């Protein structure tokens, strides 16, 4: 939408968002590419399994803090899971994951926009580190 109406933006607020491949690990890039290219039922079922309560909590939020899970607030996954309560909600999430590779392909367009217009931007990026 922004690229179609570049003068309508006043400012950007970005939280943990990417416009560069360097912001995504190679395995994550490969996941999005495979999800986009392989729309088989088996692949869709695999991605659908990633939208379960257990997967959201353990593979998205607690994956990197398994030795110290209490550092994560359950508010994060509770909010996400609120929007994944029905099968149709979860199918929409699968479709978003299958389409996400198109964002990677559009990164050069986004970068060109940012270079040309240089919008006022607040970027919040958090790298989690645990101190045990």
Image (tube, helix red, strand yellow):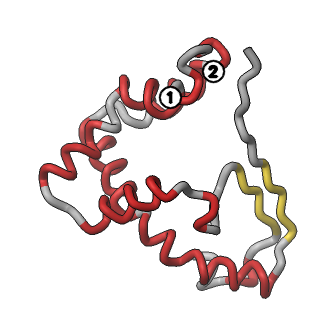
Q: Residue furthest right?
A: 120
Percent position of residue 19, x then y: 64, 67
Residue under pointer 2:
72
Residue 4 marker: none
| Residue 65 screen position, x and y as percent | 59, 23
Q: Is mark 1 on a helix, strand or loop?
A: helix
Mark 1: few/some/many CA within 10 Å (<14, 14-19, 20+): few
91 to the left or right of 131: left
Identify whether 127 is placed above or below 44: above
Q: What residue sits 62% from the left and 14% below the top?
A: 68
Image quarter of residue 31: bottom left
How many angstroms separate mark 1 from mark 2 (CA)? 11 Å
Between disc 1 and disc 2, the foreground one is 1
Q: Label 1, on which residue?
A: 63
- Which one is in front, 105 or 63? 63
Q: How many labels does the image show?
A: 2
User: To which quarter of the image does residue 69 belong?
Assistant: top right
Q: Which residue is more in the foreground, 2 or 130?
A: 130
Q: Which of marks 1 and 2 is nearer the N terminus?
A: 1
Q: Is mark 2 on a helix, strand or loop?
A: loop
**Percent x, y for residue 129?**
73, 30
Above or below, 26 relative to 66: below
Residue 75, relative to residue 36: is it above or below? above
CA neighbours of label 2 inside 10 A, class few (<14), some (14 to 19), many (20+): few
Residue at the spot 46% in from the left edge and 25% down from the top edge = 57
């Amino acid at each position: 939408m922004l690229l179609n109406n570049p003068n309508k933006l006043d400012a950007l607020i970005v939280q943990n968002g990417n416009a560069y491949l360097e912001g995504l690990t190679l395995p994550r890039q490969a996941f999005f590419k495979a999800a986009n290219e392989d729309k088989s039922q088996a692949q869709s079922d695999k991605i659908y399994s990633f939208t379960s309560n257990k997967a959201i909590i353990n593979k998205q939020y607690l994956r990197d803090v398994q030795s110290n899970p209490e550092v994560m607030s359950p508010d994060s996954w509770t909010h996400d899971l609120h929007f994944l309560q029905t099968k149709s909600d979860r199918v929409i999430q699968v479709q978003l994951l299958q389409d996400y590779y198109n964002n990677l392909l559009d990164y050069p367009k986004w970068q060109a926009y940012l270079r040309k217009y240089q919008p006022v931007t607040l970027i919040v990026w958090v790298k989690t580190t645990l101190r045990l």
